[in-house]
């Protein structure tokens, strides 16, 4: 501050800096409150919010592209970017709807056709955009147009695919949506606090404000926060149950028998911890152990997403992605660390937690030929009998 | 006079070289088909060469050949994405082999996680390699690499998926695109007058339309010829006992001759009432139409790309033709189209994959599905009703 204030009244300068902090702090609280509010409102609203955030992030990045290439007046290009956004969203939302709303889709005739030929329709829509791009190529602007085409596609790859991974996480159970996002936010705040109070050794040249003390302090604090938060949330069905669409009431419902992951289990502490804490066993939700993995990723890899965004901003000489949120910059500034986290959570769930989606399996089963269905039926029956889930005497196969 | 004579000679020499190499490539294509599903390796090699060509162009455009780490990173990302896709293919199609070998089983189970971890390692290396003066260039090359991967690698894997569906789904689309290229060129050469699009001044409407009809007829005949052989028509399977590919099956419905009643219009002109066709021949008309009508847009895209970056050809690998990418630019759209076509209109899901997923579900879910399936099969009369 002293260097900045050389030409200004020192007290005025300090006041300005405190005012910035005040605005920043206020908006941080506002965003966190908003986050809790939309969780309260439920899955449908969350999906809408994710969609809105995605559109805004896409818009911000595309605007940067335009300002970098001075290509705001390229013929057709704004239309084409939004068109591609629409196509890719149509494709992903269609896949989600087909997977999770299977019975609803089977009921309505137009939806059934759209879902059966979904990939073909999406591909045809995309091709139309592709052909329009080729037809819009203008002699003097070839290179710019290809750059913007590439820019649009990379943005779609980053922004849209990952917003859909977030939605898949959401359907797995709202806890898989809330805990990761909270861990990233917590890591941001904790790393900042630790850096503010104890920070001395710079972390990486790319972001000179980050320090090793902030990094390590943030790591431990986030793990503790994650464990505590998952303890609180694992007790409520609302957060823990997969989101399902009830065809009769035409609404989302979140009700189920909590899976094993969210039931208290007794773990024997290793002898080291036993002597330290004086407990022999501890009651934990298995999910809390998973949360350690999630928090670790958020603290260690999440910052790389932030560094990537910082590098990007330096590369294109911009201070913030946009000026949407006072004191914080654009929506993208808040979400840059979230993207890697969303992908990680999705891969984590697919690899370690969840099996395949049962309604999707039924869907595929019903699409098979009858003889294949029969073959699978017999294999499944043999498997279930073996496992003791079916009495061995129940009916003989035709 | 001597100058124009020499020019003529040079032009004929060019045509000669171009013609000879066309024949060489087509013969190479037949050889690969003969060798069977080993065409997989061919697809892999083409993919690597195309990737290399496009990345080299990127380096030249941005004068970024000496960027720290970048060559390593591009090839690393190529290996990662290929590992991901090949892993998914191996898990799907070589299920029995994977279940046998313990390390393979582990790799298959956590495949997505391992692929993601590998990709992340590359991502972190990129972030750590950012150098103060070269930020913008590095981001450009990062994006360039990713777009290239998106185009080249994903679509070479779609080609491989098509191949596993049956070699006919690999051969017919590629042949149709080649035929359309050649036919459009010949029709344009002999009859061409009206230019088609400013982007490619050598293309003409006569070539376009003539190529369309020529390709439809060619596709129709080729489909007829190939549909008779099990070698082409059957899905490629991996036989775990003999550890080799097996191409043997009961040909599916679309490769069995059906009798079709001609519509009245054609009945009058041809004086045939019915005609015996393979249903696949009708599908081939759609494939040919796509290759002739939309395929060229892939070619225009590549032409625009070359003009944008002021290059004549992608590379100089094939004399008279340019780089590998020059020969394969129209194929990419076709491969994606064939894949989408198959999944939408032809094939159902893979039964062994469905069974695999079934066995991974929770027991209650399995029971639920068992009962639903039981009811479904009973309704259809495939199972005797319960006493």
Image: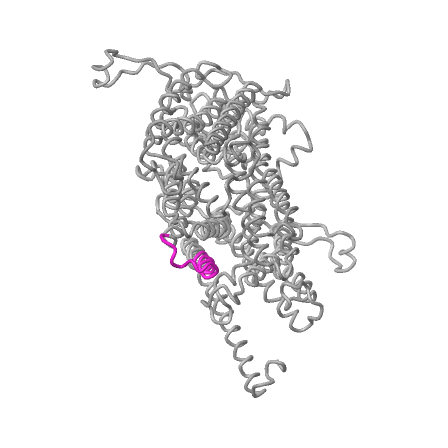
Q: Residue at x 74, y 60 (%)?
A: A277
Q: Is residue A198 left or right of residue A239?
A: right
Q: Position of residue B231 (x, y in %)?
A: 51, 16
Number of marks drawn: 0
User: Residue B166: percent from the left, percent from the top?
Assistant: 49, 23
Q: Quadrant of residue B265?
A: top left
- Residue B251 figure quarter: top left
Please name the colour scheme applied to the rendered image. one colour
> x, y (%) of residue A327?
50, 71
Residue A102 appears in view:
no
Q: Nearer the viewer, residue B163 or A241?
A: B163
In this picture, which residue range is highlighted in magenta?
A: A58-76
The foreground one among A299 and B127 is B127
Which quadrant is the N terminus of chain B positioned in?
top left
Q: Between B173 and A165, which is closer to the camera in this rendering?
A: B173
Q: Quadrant of the C terminus of chain B?
A: top left
Q: Position of residue A337 (x, y in %)?
A: 56, 58
């Amino acid at each position: 501050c002293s260097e900045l204030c050389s030409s200004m009244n020192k007290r005025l300068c300090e006041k300005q800096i405190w005012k910035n902090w005040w605005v920043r702090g206020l908006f941080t609280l506002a965003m966190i409150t908003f986050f809790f509010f939309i969780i309260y409102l439920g899955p449908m609203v969350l999906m809408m919010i994710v969609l809105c955030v995605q559109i805004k992030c896409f818009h911000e990045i595309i605007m940067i592209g335009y300002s970098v290439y001075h290509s705001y007046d390229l013929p057709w290009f704004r239309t084409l970017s939004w068109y591609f956004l629409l196509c890719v969203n149509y494709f992903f939302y269609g896949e989600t709807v087909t997977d999770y709303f299977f019975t609803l889709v089977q009921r309505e005739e137009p939806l059934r056709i759209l879902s059966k030929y979904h990939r073909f329709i999406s591909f045809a829509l995309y091709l139309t955009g592709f052909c329009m791009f080729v037809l819009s190529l203008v002699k003097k602007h070839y290179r710019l147009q290809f750059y913007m085409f590439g820019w649009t596609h990379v943005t779609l790859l980053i922004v849209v695919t990952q917003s859909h991974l977030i939605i898949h996480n959401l359907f797995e159970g709202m806890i898989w949506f809330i805990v990761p996002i909270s861990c990233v936010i917590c890591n941001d705040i904790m790393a900042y606090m630790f850096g503010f109070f104890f920070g001395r050794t710079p972390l990486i040249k790319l972001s000179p404000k980050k320090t090793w003390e902030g990094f390590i302090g943030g790591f431990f604090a986030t793990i503790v926060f994650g464990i505590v938060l998952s303890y609180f949330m694992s007790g409520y069905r609302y957060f823990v149950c997969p989101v399902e669409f009830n065809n009769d009431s035409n609404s989302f419902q979140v009700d189920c028998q909590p899976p094993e992951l969210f039931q208290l289990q007794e773990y024997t502490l290793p002898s080291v911890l036993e002597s330290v804490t004086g407990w022999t066993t501890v009651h934990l939700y298995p999910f809390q152990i998973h949360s350690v993995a999630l928090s670790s990723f958020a603290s260690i890899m999440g910052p790389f997403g932030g560094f990537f965004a910082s590098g990007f901003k330096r590369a294109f000489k911009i201070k913030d992605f946009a000026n949407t949120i006072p004191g914080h910059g654009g929506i993208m500034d808040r979400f840059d660390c979230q993207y890697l986290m969303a992908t990680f959570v999705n891969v984590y769930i697919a690899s370690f937690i969840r099996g395949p989606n049962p309604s999707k399996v039924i869907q595929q089963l019903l699409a098979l030929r009858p003889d294949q269905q029969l073959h699978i039926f017999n294999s499944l029956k043999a498997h279930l009998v073996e496992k003791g889930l079916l009495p061995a005497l129940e009916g003989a196969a035709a | 006079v001597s100058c124009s004579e020499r020019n003529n000679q040079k032009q004929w020499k060019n045509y000669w070289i171009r013609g000879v190499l066309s024949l060489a490539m087509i013969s190479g294509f037949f050889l690969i088909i003969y060798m069977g599903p080993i065409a997989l390796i061919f697809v892999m090699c083409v993919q690597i060469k195309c990737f290399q060509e496009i990345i080299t162009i990127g380096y030249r455009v941005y004068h970024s050949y000496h960027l720290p780490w970048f060559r390593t990173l591009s090839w690393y990302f190529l290996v990662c994405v290929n590992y991901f896709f090949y892993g998914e293919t191996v898990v799907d199609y070589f299920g029995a082999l994977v279940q046998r070998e313990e390390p393979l089983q582990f790799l298959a189970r956590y495949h997505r996680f391992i692929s993601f971890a590998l990709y992340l390692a590359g991502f972190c290396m990129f972030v750590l390699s950012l150098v103060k003066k070269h930020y913008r260039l590095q981001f450009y090359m990062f994006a360039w690499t990713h777009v290239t991967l998106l185009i080249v690698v994903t679509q070479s894997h779609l080609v491989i998926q098509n191949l596993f569906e049956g070699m006919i789904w690999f051969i017919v689309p590629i042949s149709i695109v080649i035929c359309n290229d050649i036919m459009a060129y010949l029709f344009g050469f002999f009859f061409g007058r009206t230019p088609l699009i400013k982007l490619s001044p050598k293309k003409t409407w006569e070539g376009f339309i003539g190529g369309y009809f020529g390709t439809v007829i060619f596709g129709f005949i080729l489909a007829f010829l190939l549909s008779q052989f099990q070698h082409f028509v059957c899905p490629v399977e991996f036989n775990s006992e003999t550890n080799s590919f097996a191409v043997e099956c009961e040909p599916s419905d679309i490769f069995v001759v059906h009798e079709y009643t001609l519509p009245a219009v054609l009945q009058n002109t041809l004086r045939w009432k019915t005609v015996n066709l393979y249903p696949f021949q009708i599908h081939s008309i759609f494939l040919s139409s796509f290759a002739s009508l939309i395929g060229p847009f892939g070619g225009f895209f590549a032409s625009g790309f070359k003009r944008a970056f002021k290059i004549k050809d992608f590379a100089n690998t094939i004399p008279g033709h340019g780089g590998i990418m020059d020969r394969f630019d129209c194929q990419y759209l076709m491969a994606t189209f064939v894949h989408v076509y198959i999944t939408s209109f032809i094939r159902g899901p893979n039964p062994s994959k469905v069974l695999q997923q079934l066995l991974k579900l929770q027991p209650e879910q399995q029971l639920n599905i068992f009962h639903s399936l039981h009811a479904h099969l009973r309704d259809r009369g495939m199972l005797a009703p319960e006493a």
